[in-house]
Each structure stands twice: as structure tokens, then as C-alpha cells.
Amino acid sequence: MKPDVKICGLSTPATLRAALERGASHIGFVSFAKSPRHLDTAPMAELARLVAGRAGTVIVTVNPDDDLIARLSEEVRPDWLQLHGKETPQRVAEVKARTGLKVMKALPVSDARDLDAIAAYRGVADRILLDSKRPKGSNLPGGNGVSFDWTLLTALDPDLSYMLSGGIDAANVAEALAIARPSGIDVSSGVESAPGVKDVGRIHAFFDAIERATAAG
Ligand SMILES: O=C(O)c1ccccc1N[C@@H]1O[C@H](COP(=O)(O)O)[C@@H](O)[C@H]1O
């Protein structure tokens, strides 16, 4: 089955159009000042208008306070908020109730014990996103282009619908899909030519690789 594909950290109309034309299910924009992909709300809202119902619009945030959540919700009108910090299940529920938006909760994984955290968020978050842990020296909790051991995920309940992220690109996405069998794939660095610079050619190569992998069964 074809996985959902989220292209994250877009910041130009040309790369956004390429992702939409190739059938991205989710388009991610980053609201985190330390990120090279950060967008202020005005340019984010302008790009979000181009998505116009063709995909789900996701805003990636890290431990956002209520003011930021209100501003992003009102000015950008996304479909989803991606919480990529240390938000508790209670906070996820509160954000959903305050905004009426769907919430994707990112959980960091490096070993099997990290998967225990999923239980507390299941049924609270609309979707779980499994990402690598922040590497030493990075000040970003995501978007580091680093993968983790996907074989850990073979132990998960097959009914868990989750997105896989972390260091996925055109060269390894077939392997990630074959091993982990996630219902969605999320990519940021893997379709960039430099940190924060999305590349139309790499976006096409990424979708080509997914099409080859899923056509092969
Ligand atoms: O992309 C960022 O800069 C970012 C900043 C803060 C939190 C999350 C961020 N990105 C998310 O990280 C993962 C994996 O990215 P990559 O493919 O390894 O570069 C993805 O979910 C992005 O949404």
C-alpha cells in the first residue's frame, strides 16, 4: 500500500508545488526559531494558501505556549500541529481541545525502551511520528538528517498508524518501507541541497524511489 508522504520544512512556492504535484499527503512548515527551516507566520500563511485542500497542512512546533498556538492556528489555519518537544499526553489533549486541530506527536527513538512511550499517546494524539533522538551537539530536536535502527519497529503493533522520520532520503526510503512498514513517511533534510534549502530534483527523486518501492510490492 502507498504510504502517506509528508514533505517537511518547505519554504518556497516552487518546492511546495513539486511536493503537491507528486502527491504529498502532508506539507510541513516549521515554526521553531533555531531551525534553518523556520518561517514567520506571514510567509507561512502565504504558502499554506497554495496548499488549499490539496494536502494536509502541518505546522511543526516545539513545546509551544498557548499564545504561539493561538497565533499559528488563527493566522495560518493549518490542519495539523506537530508537537516535536517534550509535550505530555495531557498537553497534547489540551492543544487538541483548545484548537480543534489534529495533533501529530513526535517521539524520539534510539532503543526498544523508547517505544514504551507510545502507549500513553495512543488514542490521544491523532498520529504518532517516530523520529531519531537529537544527536549530540545539535540544537534541533528534529530535522537532523539522522536515522535510527528501523528493525526496532518490527515489534510494534501492526495496527499502530504512525509516520516514520529521521534521515530518510531517496537512497534509503525503500529499505525503510520494507523494514518498518509505516503508514507514513516524513522527510526534511533528505530532500535538501543544504540545511533549510529544499531541492526540486531531490523531491522528485524521493517520490520516484517511493513509487519504485511500492510498485515492487
Ligand atoms: O526540520 C526542522 O528543522 C525541525 C525543527 C524542530 C523540530 C522538528 C524538525 N523537523 C522534523 O524532524 C523530522 C526529521 O527530519 P529529517 O528528515 O531527519 O531532516 C521531521 O519529522 C521533521 O518534521
Image (cartoon, rainbow, N blue to C red):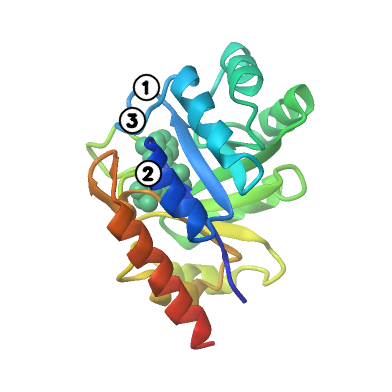
| SS at circle 1 | loop
Read off the residue under disc 3.
35
- Point 45% across, 47% down: residue: 17
Q: Are marks 1 and 2 in contact (CB under 8 Å)?
A: no
**Mark 1 or mark 2: whose residue is earlier in sequence:** 2
The quadrant of the rendered image in which ligand 1 is seen is top left
Image-quadrant location for residue 134:
top left
Query: Would residue 86 be visible to someone looking at this image?
Result: no
Query: Would residue 116 be visible to someone looking at this image?
Result: yes
Cβ at disc 3 under 8 Å from ligand 1: yes
Decide which of 161, 73 is in the foreground and name it: 73
184, above or below 37, in the image = below
Read off the residue under disc 1.
33
Q: Do the residues labelled 1 and 3 touch (CB within 8 Å)?
A: yes
Q: Which amino acid does label 2 sit on?
A: Ala
Image-quadrant location for residue 10:
top left
The quarter of the image holding the N terminus is: bottom right
* Residue at the extreme bottom: 216
The mark closer to the camera, 1 or 2, is: 2
Q: Spatial distance from mark 1 to mark 3, Cα to Cα?
A: 5 Å
**Left or right position of 22 against 161:** left
155, above or below 100, in the image = below
15, above or below 5, in the image = above
Which mark, by number, is residue 14? Answer: 2
